[in-house]
Image (cartoon, grey):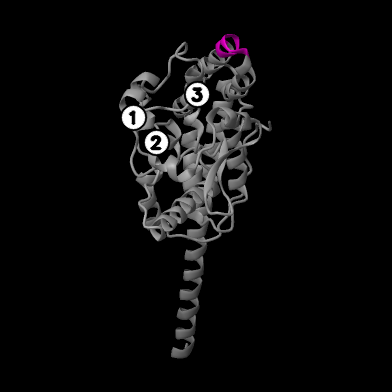
């Protein structure tokens, strides 16, 4: 065999090896995406079943708070009933997990493989019963504050203690900034205000107008803003929150004013949350090792035969 033929054969083998190596890496990434989505699906289904069977402690408490507040203040019975829906698998908080799962099965083109895996991991964590139980403290405490002290706050210091430490607190502030219940909308003057979604709009009559810059500087403690935002916010909503903070900071700088990010510092006020809420997300612990082991392939998408079975 001539040297030319040997060289040609060696070159062909090298090319084939490279092609097989690339395919193997992409296959490993797809397997990781599929596996992580399946784990998220299992966690979501398990949580939904626990809610239906009334096995989530704070969900049961939220239901009870809604009933008590409705009896104490009949004029608030409708909003109490709406907020209490989060105690069920048909509530906004649980349904948001389902929506996010479905969106990850057909991910946004801007998401790369790491984004998809990270979002699936965050979704799996958000669906854990202990973390979801903590996330319910925000709607619980909205009802507690509406009761004028008749109902005690859960997972947070009392309203009186917070007022002593941080000044006057507004009723309903725990849900302001929470992407599951509303969003920030910017008017023609460049000023952003909080807008409630659909059935939560009646909270606007109780909370009043909330301007983003002022809220960013003076916001009070909430589980979502101080512990749960990464886990309980969709990929797109999180990006919008980040972009809004950046735009507002630039606007303030042009005016010679100081902008304080609403998430620059964790607010005090939590009390008795689970260990899970105080444990860093697996995303922050695993992102580097995962990226270094297989790299990043843009525009990867997942196709899994299993999915969340709850079609509510």
From this view, report whether residue 259 is shown above or below residue 147: below
- Horizontal and vertical percent for residue 56? 51, 19
The residues tagged by marks 3 and 1 sit, at their Cα atoms, a distance apart of: 17 Å
Disc 1, SS = helix
**With respect to residue 57, does 36 lie above or below?**
below
Q: Quadrant of the C terminus?
A: top right
Q: Which of marks 1 and 2 is nearer the N terminus?
A: 1
Neighbours of disc 2 within 10 Å: few (<14), some (14-19), many (20+)? some
From the viewer's perspective, is residue 9 above or below residue 161?
below
Q: Which residue has dot 1 on it?
A: 166
**Which label's residue is closer to the chain start, 3 or 1?**
3
Residue pointed to by mark 3? 142
Q: From where the camera sits, is residue 271 visible?
A: no
Provide the secondary structure element on which disc 2 rests: helix
Number of marks in the rendered image: 3
Q: Which of the marked residues, 2 or 3, is nearer the chain's N terminus?
A: 3
Taking the spot 48% from the left edge, 18% from the top edge, the residue there is 144
Q: Could you tell me what secondary structure mostly forms the magenta stretch?
A: helix
**For residue 305, above or below residue 267:** below
Image: magenta residue range:
68-74
């Amino acid at each position: 065999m001539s040297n030319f033929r040997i060289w040609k054969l060696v070159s062909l083998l090298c090319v084939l090896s490279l092609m097989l190596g690339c395919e193997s890496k992409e296959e490993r990434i797809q397997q990781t995406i599929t596996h992580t989505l399946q784990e998220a699906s299992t966690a979501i289904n398990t949580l939904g079943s626990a809610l239906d069977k009334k096995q989530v402690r704070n969900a049961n408490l939220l239901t009870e708070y809604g009933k008590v507040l409705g009896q104490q203040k009949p004029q608030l019975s409708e909003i109490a009933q709406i907020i209490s829906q989060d105690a069920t698998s048909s509530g906004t908080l649980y349904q948001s997990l389902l929506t996010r799962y479905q969106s990850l099965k057909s991910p946004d083109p801007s998401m790369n493989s790491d984004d998809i895996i990270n979002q699936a991991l965050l979704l799996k964590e958000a669906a854990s019963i202990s973390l979801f139980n903590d996330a319910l403290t925000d709607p619980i405490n909205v009802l507690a504050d509406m009761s004028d002290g008749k109902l005690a706050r859960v997972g947070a210091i009392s309203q009186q203690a917070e007022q002593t430490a941080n000044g006057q607190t507004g009723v309903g502030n725990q849900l302001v900034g929470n992407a599951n219940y509303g969003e920030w909308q910017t008017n023609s003057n460049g000023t952003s205000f909080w807008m409630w979604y659909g059935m939560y709009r009646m909270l606007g009559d109780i909370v009043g107008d909330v301007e983003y810059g002022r809220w960013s500087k003076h916001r009070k403690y909430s589980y979502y803003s101080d512990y749960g935002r990464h886990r309980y916010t969709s990929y797109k909503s999180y990006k919008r929150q980040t972009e809004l903070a950046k735009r507002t900071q630039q606007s303030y700088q042009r005016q010679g004013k100081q902008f304080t990010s609403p998430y620059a510092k964790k607010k005090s006020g939590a009390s008795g949350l689970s260990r899970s809420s105080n444990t860093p997300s697996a995303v922050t612990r695993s992102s580097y090792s995962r990226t270094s082991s297989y790299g990043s392939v843009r525009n990867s998408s997942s196709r899994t035969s299993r999915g969340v079975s709850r079609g509510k």
